[in-house]
Amino acid sequence: MKKLYYTISEVSEILGLKTHIIRYWIAEIPKLQKDSVKGKTIQFIEKDLDLMKKLKELIYEKKFTLEGAKAEIMKKKTPITENPSRSNIDIKQELLEIKKILLKRNNQQ
């Protein structure tokens, strides 16, 4: 089961990279930048993880520089994953089902 959020340590473990590299990418890649709150853990979603996997591929396998990888990612307007695990339609359907359940419970009270 996939998680909703990943910590920087979990991302580091998944990607096989040190956390300082991920922090550097966060500072340099606008799509990864998060609103930071003092004392709060940075949380990443699946989309962030996919973006970092793509960055790793471009930098470590295809030998792009960080600037080159950044340019490659920024010019793409399509999602990073070509085969998303869940479509927007699936998510919308699940949300509608949850809404029905919550309305049903609310009416029973």
Image (cartoon, rainbow, N blue to C red):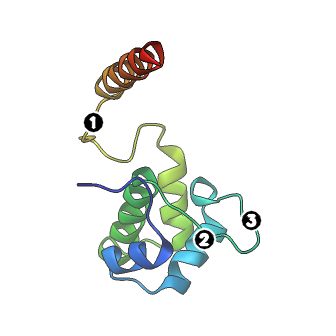
* Extreme residue toward the right, this view: 38
Amino acid carrying mark 2 in the image: Thr
Element type at mark 1: loop
Residue 1 versus residue 81: which sits nearer the camera?
1
Q: Which residue appears at 43% of the width and 57% of the height?
A: 51
Q: Residue 39: where, in percent of width, then height? A: 72, 75
Element type at mark 2: loop
Alpha carbon separation for disc pair 3 and 2: 8 Å
Q: Residue 26: where, in percent of width, then height? A: 60, 68
Q: Which mark is residue 51?
A: none
Q: Mark 2 points at which residue?
A: 41
Amino acid carrying mark 1 in the image: Arg
Q: Which residue appears at 28% of the width and 26% of the height?
A: 90
15 on left or right of 39: left
52 on left or right of 32: left
Alpha carbon separation for disc pair 2 and 1: 26 Å
Crowd band around label 1 with a 10 angstrom C-alpha radius: few (<14), some (14–19), many (20+):
few
Crowd band around label 3 with a 10 angstrom C-alpha radius: few (<14), some (14–19), many (20+):
few
Q: Name the residue under label 3.
A: 37
Alpha carbon separation for disc pair 3 and 1: 30 Å
Q: Residue 33: where, in percent of width, then height? A: 64, 60
Q: Which residue appears at 37% of the width and 25% of the height?
A: 98
> Number of labelled discs?
3
Q: Name the residue under label 1.
A: 86
Q: Looking at the image, is mark 3 or mark 1 nearer the viewer?
A: 3
Q: Where is residue 62, by image quadrant?
A: bottom left
Element type at mark 3: loop
